Image (tube, rainbow, N blue to C red):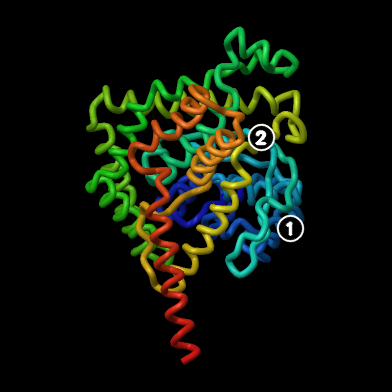
Amino acid sequence: PIVSCGETCDALGYGHDILAACGQQGYYFSHKSGETFKCWENYGTDELFLQIAEAKRNGLPVVVIAAGGGVNGNCIGLIAACTNLHLVEVPTTPMHYNDATTSAKKAFSLVQENKILSKNIMGAFYIPQLVFCISETFLTLSSANVHATIGESCKTMNMLGMTNTAVGAQDYYNIEGGTEFASDCTRIVQHVAGFDELVQFIQDPLTRELKADIIAVGVTLRSQTGGATLQSLQQRARLLESFRERYYSLGPNRTRRIKDFLSVVNREIVLAKAMFLAYSDPFEKFRALLFEYAHTLGHGVEAYANLAYQMAKDRGIPIPEEAVKLHGQCVGMAVLWAGQMSLDLGELCGTNFDLHQSFVYLFNRHGGVDFVPLKACLFYTSESADEEGSVSHG
């Protein structure tokens, strides 16, 4: 087995736990996380390919296990496709589970000097043999991950609506799988209380403190050897147990609402994508292109934001958590822009416009699609760059 995971998943111990559960010697591949590092240079390492080649020379079947978020699944999935390896995905974010794994697309972006020049420019179609989700890993999500899940879902809610109704069946009568995988993405709005509960749990100061302690131990483990490693592993395990106990101490009503929210989001989005991808358009060349709705604008904002984050990091400028916007959040904002542009063109009016925008606004109650903090971060970063330029030219 080859277990691939990013920095946060590694620090939380999920990757190590999966490799240990395999019960045999394998290769642990940890790498940088995020869209800025969704590139060949980050994943196509000499060491990784040497491990693959050595296993094949010895006649061993190689299974790549992608543990973590969607970027990791996409990129290591492309490595598996290029080297003809078995692929298993273990999502630790809802976006990886209901969005990335439901598409056969695996891809790298073109990134130069931390600039995303083109998203998903090189790829392949490669289906995992198994998607195995351990739902408790969703408890260690960042609030941005939760908002990203909803932002992407708002696109699908507006795109498809209720395909399991008579009107929906009429609209999609010629889609093979339209009945088998009929979904009602509007059900997601019925579970906004669970969304609230999950965000409140994640943002609670004690929850954040516990998670930070777990990650700190995980970061320390990267440089430890011998007995110190065992002690830190035991400490991280105890902290994770305390973290989960804190969640279950919320009580059965609150935890049920959170579970129902995640279950409904995952179920309806998976059904919506399977409706098109299972039979009708698995290579996403025709009607499945509907899933690209709001992505052109969203990708542009996402690429620019990721560059700004890297620039701020290089200059030692702290990035406020509320300023960090992930892929799904950028798509959610782009849904609003698309609605407004349609209104301006006279194509989407009255109640239809209100309904289109309302999905995003309903789930923006915690500011997940509020881009004012990002705008302030961009302004501050550009001002800092101007000051540096003035000094260097002085």
User: Which tag is nearer the camera, tag 2 or tag 1?
Assistant: 2
Q: Compared to 168, does 185 lie above or below? A: below
- Tag 2: residue type? Gln
- The residue type indicated by label 1 comes to Ala
The residue shown at (76%, 31%) is 286
Q: Which quarter of the figure has residue 381?
A: bottom left
Q: Which residue is mark 2?
A: 129
Q: Residue at x 69, y 25 (%)?
A: 276
N-terminal of the two: label 2 or label 1? 1
Mark 2 crowd level (few <14, some 14–19, many ≥20, 10 Å Cα):
few
Q: Secondary structure at mark 1?
A: helix
In terms of depth relative to the viewer, which is nearer, 70 or 121?
A: 121
User: Which residue appears at 33% of the width and 48% of the height?
Assistant: 237
Q: Is residue 90 visible?
A: no
Residue 224 is situated, as x and y percent measured from the top left of the image, at: 39, 67
**Residue linked to disc 1:** 53
- The answer to whether one can see residue 236 in this image is yes
Q: Position of residue 242 (x, y in %)?
A: 26, 43
* Residue 357 relative to residue 164: left or right: left
Determine the CA span between mark 2 and mark 1.
21 Å
Q: Secondary structure at mark 2?
A: loop
Q: Nearer the viewer, residue 23 or 133?
A: 133
Q: Residue at x 54, y 35 (%)?
A: 339
User: Extreme bottom residue here?
Assistant: 394
